[in-house]
Amino acid sequence: ELPIGVHTKFVEKSKEILRPLLDIIVGNDVNKEAGNFFGRFNMKEGDPVVSFRILDSEISRRYFSGLTYNTAFVSEFARLDIPVGNVIIVENMHNMHKLIEMLPEKSNIMVVWGSGYNVTVLKYAGWLNNVNLYYWGDIDAQGYEILSNVRKYFPHIVSIMMDKEAVGVHPIKVAGKESNVNITTGLSEEEKEVYYYVKENNIRFEQEFLPENYVHECLNKIS
């Protein structure tokens, strides 16, 4: 909708070039709390969506006609009123589906796909303050930076499988993505210790490769 005489995909394809320029042009009006390019520069992008899965067959039958996988606009997700006591936010979609396969009848649990840094859209869902809230992300700099961002809105959120124990049982270490961010708040002392370890060594322990028996053991502690 911007009257700038370029094709409709110009902004989407040129974000890496436009961002530093717009940071200067927009100046004090930059929305630094936004989780994406368009929000950063106050552009309209419609209502974001939230994908989630229900691990409780009774809740899925009663409130979602038996559907276990659902997608809703964030404004609608914010109005959900269901009797779920535990919500697990996962960084990637693969693990959202993996949890359903591993724990097909785990009652009283919802799994939400955080979609990386886009997880901040969940800040509008105030009802998440009334549940046991967990975050499961990659053990890398970005995973902890995302966790720190979420804690701004939900201070009670607990990280799972992102501690020194998880590092110790993880069989695969890969190269990480360099980060120029320096977190000083929002993490526990143990989380900070692991964060600086993976950041300074530029490594990543991906969620998907954690041993399944370890994942089972950790998840079974949630009830």
Image (cartoon, grey):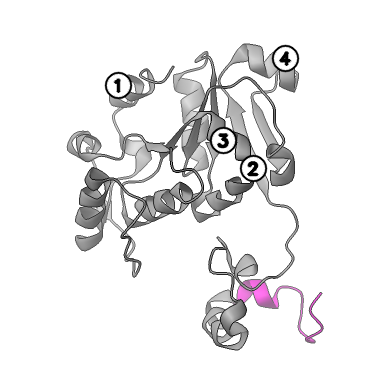
- Secondary structure beneath dot 2 equals strand
C-beta proximity under 8 Å, tags 3 and 2: no
Q: How crowded is mark 2: few (under 14 residues within 10 Å), some or many (20 or more)?
A: many
Q: Which of marks 3 and 2 is nearer the N terminus?
A: 2
Which mark identifies residue 50? 2
Q: Compute the Cα span from label 4 to label 1.
A: 31 Å
Q: Give the range drawn in magenta.
A: 1-14
Magenta region's main secondary structure? loop
SS at mark 3 in the image: helix
Camera-near label (3 vs 1) is 3
Discs 1/2, front: 2
- Name the residue located 37 percent from the left edge and 51 percent from the top edge: 186
Q: Is residue 154 visible?
A: yes
Q: In this view, does 60 lie above or below 33?
A: above
Nearer to the camera, 18 or 102? 18
> Is residue 145 found inside the magenta-colored segment of the image?
no
Residue 25 to residue 145: above or below = below
Residue 2 is one of the magenta-drawn residues: yes
Mark 1 or mark 2, earlier in chain: 2
